[in-house]
Image (spheres, helix red, strand yellow):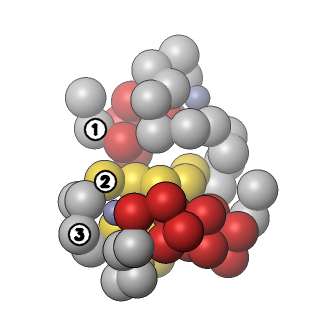
Amino acid sequence: MNRSQAKAEHTQKTGHEQFTETVYGVLCAACHNYILIDHTNCPPTCREHETCRQAYGS
Ligand SMILES: [Zn+2]
Ligand SMILES: [Zn+2]
């Protein structure tokens, strides 16, 4: 999954259309949550990786 796909999918699911791109990945402006992390491409629920925990916040 790349950034564009993640945004499209999130918009489809939630109707949220505003995103902030950071060094980690893509942040939804409405959810205040990451919807994609570049390095792992893990879902926001992932807590297995240090990167995911840091980027998605716990
Ligand atoms: Zn959202
Ligand atoms: Zn992960």
Q: List the residue tagged with mark 3.
A: 30
**Placement of the C terminus among the 4 image quadrants:** top left
What kind of element bears circle 1?
loop
- Whether pointer 2 and pointer 1 mark residues with C-beta atoms closer than 8 Å, the reply is yes
Relative vertical location of residue 19 with respect to residue 33 in this rendering, above or below = below
Q: Position of residue 54 (x, y in %)?
A: 36, 37
Number of the front mark, 1 or 3: 3
Whichever of labels 2 and 1 marks the residue nearer the N terminus, that label is 2
Q: List the residue tagged with mark 2.
A: 33
Determine crowd level at label 2: few under 14, some 14-19, many 20+ residues with C-alpha closer than 10 A. some
Q: Kindly tell me whether mark 1's CB lies below 8 Å from ligand 2.
A: no
Q: Is residue 40 visible?
A: yes
Q: Kindly tell me whether mark 3's CB lies below 8 Å from ligand 1.
A: yes
Number of the front mark, 2 or 1: 2
User: Which quadrant of the frame does ligand 1 lie within?
Assistant: bottom left
Q: Kindly tell me whether mark 2's CB lies below 8 Å from ligand 1.
A: yes
Q: List the residue tagged with mark 1.
A: 57
Taking the image as shown, residue 4 lies to the left or right of residue 57, namely right
Q: Position of residue 31 (x, y in %)?
A: 25, 59
Amino acid type for the residue under numbered disc 1: Gly
Amino acid type for the residue under numbered disc 2: Asn
Which residue lies at the image location 39% right of the left edge and 63% below the top edge? Answer: 14
Q: Is residue 3 visible?
A: no
For this orientation, the residue located farthest to the top is 48
Q: Nearer the viewer, residue 53 or 33?
A: 33
Whichever of labels 1 and 3 marks the residue nearer the N terminus, that label is 3
Give the Cα separation between the discs numbered 1 and 3: 16 Å
Which residue lies at the image location 67% right of the left edge and 45% below the top edge? Answer: 41
